[in-house]
Image (spheres, grey):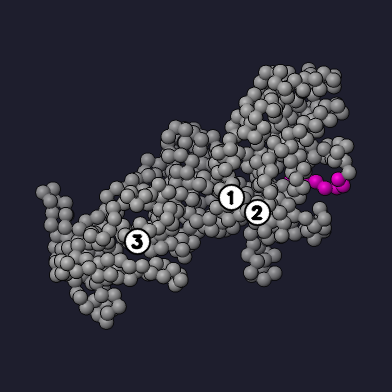
C-alpha cells in the first residue's frame, strides 16, 4: 500500500491504479460509500507467495480505507479440497499480519446457487447437455469461428429440470451430464459460448458431505458469492480478465430473479492485476504438488518451497514479504520479478531484528598457548547493533576455541587478512592474537592452530584500539553446543524454469539446493531461542531455529546469506 506518512501530494503520486479506482468510487459515494473486499482461495493446497500479493492487496485496501475484508473459501471441487488446507490458509494469513472480518464458504451458498440455476432453466437460459467433454470442446469453435449449437440446446425446460434434480441426488453418473448456460455460441468471447454451470461429482465434500452430488463451476459460483456477501471490489489476477464479462452477466441475471431484483444498482466491480512471478521459482500448484508427492522436497513447508509456510520455516519475516510486495507494486502487465529483490527486502528487515550470535560451521581448533588452561572469561555480546533495546548476552572465552577452517591459511597471499602464521587478527569481542603455527595429520589436514594473545587488547581496553585488518568469530570448545545446520539455496538452477517448456521441470532442480552440515558448533545462548527465532550467524548469514529443533538436537536453517552471491555468479557466466 502507499505510504501514508509522506504528505497528501506524494501519497497521491504513489497510488496504484486500484487505489485510484477505490478512492474515486468512495468519492462518488458508490455502494453507499462502502469498501468491501475478500480473499477467496480454493482450499486445495497450501498458499504460496503469489497468494501473498493478493492477500496484501485485499486486506491492505480494507485497512487503508476503513473497509472490510473477508476470507472466503471457494470450495466447489470436493475432490481436491480438505480441511487441512483450510487450516493452513488461516494460519498463513494471520502470520502475514492480517485478520479477516468474517469467514465464508462458497458451500454456504449451494442452495442459493442451485435455486438460481433452476430459475435460469425455467427462463430458458440453461439446459442439460449429455455430450462428452470432447464433443463439447469440438463444437465450441475457435476465437475466429463460431461454435455449433449442442443438439440438447433446445431441450424442453421440464426435461432439463428433472435431469438437473437427478444430478443433485446422485442418479446421474459422473461425466454423463452437465448444466450449461444458454448464451451465445457465436460470441467472440469463448467464455460466453454456453459455459458449463454444474457437473456431477460423487465425492464427499469437506463441509457438506454427500448432501450434494452436483457442484457449481467456479465461473458460476464466484461472482454470485461476491454478490451475496456484498463485495464492492472483486480483485483478481490478469488471467481472469476474459472471464469478467461472464462474471457480470451472471450477476446481472441474478439481480433479475425475484429474491434479488430489488437490490438496486449494486454490483461488485472486478479489477485485474498482475500475478507475482519470481525467478528460480515455480508457482504452479500442479508442479508444487508433484515436488511434494514425489519426495523431491520435504513437504509443503520445505524451506525451499515458495509456499508461505515454507518461507516462514526458512526464517523469512512477514514484514519482509509485505515490504517486497509493496516494492514491486500492482500493474496491468505480467513481469518476472528477480528473487534477489525479495532477498534484499529480507536482509534489510532481518538486519533490524535478528539477534547476532556466533556459530562455526566447519570447525578447526584454535589453541591460545599463553592463555591459562583453567581460565574462563565472560564477555558481553551485543544482541543487535541496530536496536539498542535488544540488549546483550554473555559468551564464554577460554583457551581452546573453534574457528572456521576457511579462516586459516598456512601459506597466505599478501592481501589475506585472516589467520596466518606471523600475523595478528582480532577475535571478535575478545583479544588480538598472533598465529604461531599449526598441527597437521598424516594427510596434511590442519587439526590444530596455535596462537598467542595480548592480554592488554581485550575489547574495551586502551590497547584494543590497535589496528588489525582481520576480525574472526569463534566459539569456546568447552562452552559451545553441537548443531545441525541446513544450508538452503534456490530450488531451481535456471532463472525462469516455467519458460523451459521443452524440458521436464524436474531436470531443472538445483542439486545443491540443500546441504546438511552436522559437525557445527554454536554458542550456548542460542539454545534458549524458540523455533522460528531470527538470528545472524556473524560473518556467515541469517539463520533461524527450525521447528524440529530440540535441546538435545539443535537444528538451524540458513535463511539468506549476508550478501547476494548469485548475482556475482550470474555476471561471471
Helix or strand or loop: what does disc 1 sit on?
helix
Q: Are marks 2 and 1 in contact (CB under 8 Å)?
A: yes
Left or right: 34 in relation to 571: right
- The boundaries of the magenta stretch are 263-270
Helix or strand or loop: what does disc 3 sit on?
helix
Label whose residue precedes the other's in the sequence (2 or 3): 2
Label whose residue precedes the other's in the sequence (1 or 3): 1
Circle 1 sits on which residue? 93
Helix or strand or loop: what does disc 2 sit on?
helix
Residue toward you, 533 or 274? 533
Q: Quadrant of residue 422?
A: bottom left
Circle 3 sits on which residue? 525
Q: Report the residue at 82% width, 48% height from top.
A: 266
Q: Is residue 228 visible?
A: yes
Left or right: 263 in relation to 394: right
Q: Which image quarter holds the N terminus?
A: bottom right
Amino acid at each position: 500500500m502507499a505510504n501514508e506518512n509522506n504528505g497528501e501530494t506524494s501519497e497521491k503520486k504513489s497510488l496504484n491504479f486500484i487505489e485510484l479506482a477505490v478512492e474515486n468510487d468512495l468519492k462518488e459515494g458508490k455502494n453507499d460509500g462502502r469498501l468491501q473486499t475478500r480473499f477467496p482461495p480454493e482450499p486445495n493446497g497450501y498458499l504460496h507467495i503469489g497468494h501473498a500479493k493478493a492477500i496484501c492487496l485485499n486486506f491492505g485496501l480494507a485497512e487503508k480505507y476503513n473497509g472490510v475484508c473477508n476470507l472466503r473459501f471457494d470450495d466447489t471441487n470436493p475432490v481436491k479440497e480438505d480441511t487441512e488446507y483450510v487450516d493452513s490458509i488461516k494460519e498463513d494469513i494471520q502470520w502475514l499480519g492480517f485478520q479477516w472480518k468474517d469467514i465464508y464458504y462458497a458451500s454456504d451458498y449451494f442452495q442459493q446457487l442451485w435455486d438460481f440455476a433452476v430459475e435460469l432453466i425455467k427462463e430458458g437460459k440453461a439446459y442439460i447437455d449429455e455430450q462428452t467433454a470432447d464433443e463439447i470442446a469440438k463444437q465450441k469453435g475457435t476465437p475466429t469461428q463460431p461454435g455449433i449449437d449442442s443438439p440438447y440446446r433446445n431441450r424442453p425446460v421440464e426435461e432439463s429440470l428433472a435431469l438437473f434434480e437427478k444430478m443433485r441426488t446422485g442418479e446421474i453418473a459422473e461425466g454423463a451430464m452437465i448444466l450449461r448456460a444458454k448464451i451465445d455460441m457465436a460470441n467472440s468471447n469463448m467464455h460466453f459460448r454456453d459455459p458449463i454451470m454444474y457437473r456431477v461429482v460423487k465425492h464427499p465434500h469437506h463441509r457438506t458431505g454427500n448432501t450434494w452430488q452436483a457442484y457449481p463451476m467456479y465461473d458460476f459460483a464466484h461472482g454470485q458469492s461476491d454478490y451475496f456477501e456484498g463485495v464492492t471490489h472483486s480483485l483478481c489476477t490478469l488471467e481472469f480478465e476474459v472471464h469478467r464479462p461472464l462474471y457480470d452477466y451472471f450477476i446481472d441475471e441474478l439481480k433479475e430473479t425475484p429474491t434479488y431484483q430489488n437490490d438496486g444498482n449494486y454490483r461488485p466491480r472486478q479489477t485485474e492485476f498482475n500475478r507475482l512471478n519470481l525467478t528460480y521459482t515455480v508457482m504452479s500448484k500442479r508442479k508444487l504438488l508433484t515436488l511434494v508427492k514425489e519426495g523431491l522436497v520435504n513437504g509443503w513447508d520445505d524451506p525451499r518451497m515458495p509456499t508461505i509456510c515454507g518461507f516462514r520455516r526458512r526464517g523469512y519475516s512477514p514484514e519482509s514479504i509485505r515490504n517486497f510486495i509493496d516494492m514491486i507494486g500492482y500493474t496491468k502487465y505480467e513481469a518476472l520479478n528477480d528473487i534477489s529483490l525479495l532477498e534484499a527486502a529480507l536482509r534489510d528487515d532481518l538486519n533490524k531484528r535478528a539477534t547476532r550470535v556466533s556459530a562455526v560451521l566447519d570447525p578447526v581448533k584454535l589453541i591460545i598457548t599463553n592463555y591459562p588452561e583453567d581460565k574462563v572469561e565472560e564477555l558481553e555480546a551485543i544482541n543487535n547493533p541496530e536496536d539498542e533495546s535488544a540488549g546483550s548476552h554473555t559468551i564464554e572465552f577460554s583457551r581452546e576455541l573453534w574457528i572456521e577452517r576457511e579462516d586459516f591459511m598456512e601459506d597466505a597471499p599478501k592481501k589475506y587478512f585472516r589467520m596466518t602464521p606471523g600475523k595478528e587478527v582480532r577475535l571478535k569481542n575478545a583479544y588480538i592474537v598472533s598465529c604461531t603455527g599449526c598441527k597437521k595429520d598424516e594427510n596434511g589436514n590442519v587439526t590444530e592452530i596455535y596462537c598467542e594473545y595480548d592480554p592488554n587488547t581485550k575489547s574495551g581496553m586502551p590497547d584494543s584500539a590497535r589496528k588489525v585488518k582481520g576480525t574472526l568469530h569463534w566459539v569456546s570448545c568447552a562452552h559451545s553446543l553441537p548443531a545441525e545446520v541446513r544450508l538452503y539455496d534456490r530450488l531451481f538452477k535456471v532463472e525462469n524454469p516455467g519458460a523451459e517448456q521443452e524440458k521436464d521441470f524436474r531436470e531443472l532442480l538445483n542439486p545443491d539446493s540443500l546441504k546438511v552440515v552436522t559437525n557445527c558448533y554454536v554458542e550456548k545462548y542460542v539454545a534458549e531461542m524458540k523455533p522460528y527465532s531470527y538470528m545472524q550467524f556473524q560473518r556467515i548469514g541469517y539463520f533461524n531455529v527450525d521447528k524440529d529443533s530440540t535441546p538435545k538436537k539443535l537444528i538451524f536453517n540458513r535463511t539468506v546469506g549476508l550478501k547476494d552471491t548469485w548475482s556475482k555468479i550470474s555476471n561471471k557466466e
